[in-house]
Amino acid sequence: MTGQVRVALGDRGYDILIGGGLLERAGEFIARVRKPRRVFVVTDANVAGSHLPRLEGGLRAAGIAASAIVRPPGEGAKTWDGLGELLNAVLDGRPERGDMLLALGGGVVGDMTGVAASLLLRGLDFVQCPTTLLAQVDSSVGGKTGVNTRHGKNLIGAFHQPRLVLCDLDALDTLGPRELRAGYAETVKYGLIDMPDFFAWCEANAAALLAGDRAARAHAVKIACEAKARIVAEDERETGARALLNLGHTFGHALEAELGYGPELLHGEAVALGMRQAFDFSVRAGLCPPADAARVRAHLAACGLPVALPDSRRWDADRLVGHMGHDKKTRDGKVTFILARGIGKSFVARDAEIGDVRAMLETECAA
Ligand code: GLY
């Protein structure tokens, strides 16, 4: 194991383990927390082929019985109906209170498994085994769970913390370049929020990380998990600082909603574009030095992440602003944005002028 990070939430606290070969030892690590009679492994059809045998072997080696539930892959599966199917699939196996759920996959699998764990038998323990970079650096940590509705992303869900997170770096070797880049957007986000030194590290090391450098990946996942653990421990229910993790998300979710959460723009890609927009908007608002926004744009573009609206369609600023109004970050009818006074100087803005946001988007849509 190359890294261990504690999420300090009292008796609901847990460890994030980072390293290679962790799935093969999953049973050993789970048993150190609490040895369950049985684990229901939730995964998707893509991940199952690459990683399920390793994990099942790791559970068996520790004497833990495993039942696998293989779901369809993709954000389109993260629905109320999909959740109902998952709940019934677990119930078909007659779970008992001491059993656990385990999410083996990316953010979709992790979010859905978390909701299911929060509901089944009024709450079962669950373990996160994230297999994408995005899930390792963000969605598997912190206990946010959710499914999408036609009104927006993750509008149904609960805070339900996992008992353990296993970030197996071997899993990253099986990702395609686009999925890796999308996860990298959520990684570099921590530098933009409040760690300018980490952003500088990212500028110097992103190419190696994306090309497969194990040490760079281990370092980035550890720094990201430490940052996330710190913020979640400070503000588990997102009444304050945790909102900073939504940098790029108000802009990005609007793009995703407009595209129907389809494959044209992956979540991490939407976040990258959204972070670029958040920095450019901060410049327009006189908050951020233009040179910092230019540096953000240049770095994201150099990593192959989108920084301009996809030209596959005619974009409409009013529609994008309309989607922002449905975001669950809306309070008292005001949309919350994460803006920046510079790289590593992000803050929560609850009073941004939506007319100014629309004006910037109109310019972008007309381009
Ligand atoms: N992904 C943002 C959060 O966990 O708060």
Image: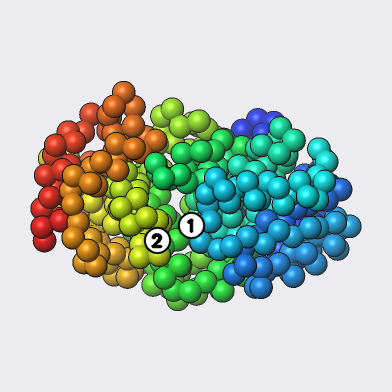
Residue found 23% across the figure and 51% down from its top? 277
Q: Kindly state the secondary structure of the residue where label 1 is placed.
A: helix
224 to 156, vertically: above or below: below
Q: Amino acid at mark 1?
A: Glu
Q: Looking at the image, which residue is at 51% across and 65% down?
A: 217
Q: How would you rate the neighbour count of disc 1 (Cα within 10 Å): few for under 14, some for 14-19, many for 20 or more? A: some
Mark 2 Cα-neighbour bin, 10 Å: few <14, some 14–19, many ≥20: some
Please indicate, yes or no, whether residue 177 appears anywhere in the rendered image: yes
Q: Earlier in the sequence, mark 1 or mark 2?
A: 1
Relative to 212, say whether 320 is above or below: above
Q: Which residue is the site of mark 1?
A: 75
What sort of colour scheme is used for the picture?
rainbow
The amino acid type found where label 2 is placed reads Gly
In the image, taking residue 9 as reference, residue 138 lies left or right, namely left
Q: In the image as oriented, which residue stretches furthest toward the right?
A: 63
Looking at the rendered image, the quarter that the C terminus falls into is: bottom left
Quarter of the picture containing the N terminus is bottom right
The foreground one among 2 and 135 is: 135
Q: Residue at x 32, y 70 (%)?
A: 304
- 343 displayed left or right of 66: left
* Position in image of residue 295 (x %, y %): 23, 59
Residue 345, percent from left and from top:
29, 42
Among the 4 quarters of the image, the one containing residue 301: bottom left
Q: CA distance from mark 1 to mark 2?
A: 7 Å
Pointer 1 and pointer 2: residues touching (CB < 8 Å)?
yes
**Residue underneath mark 2:** 262
In the displayed structure, 350 sits above or below 166; it is above
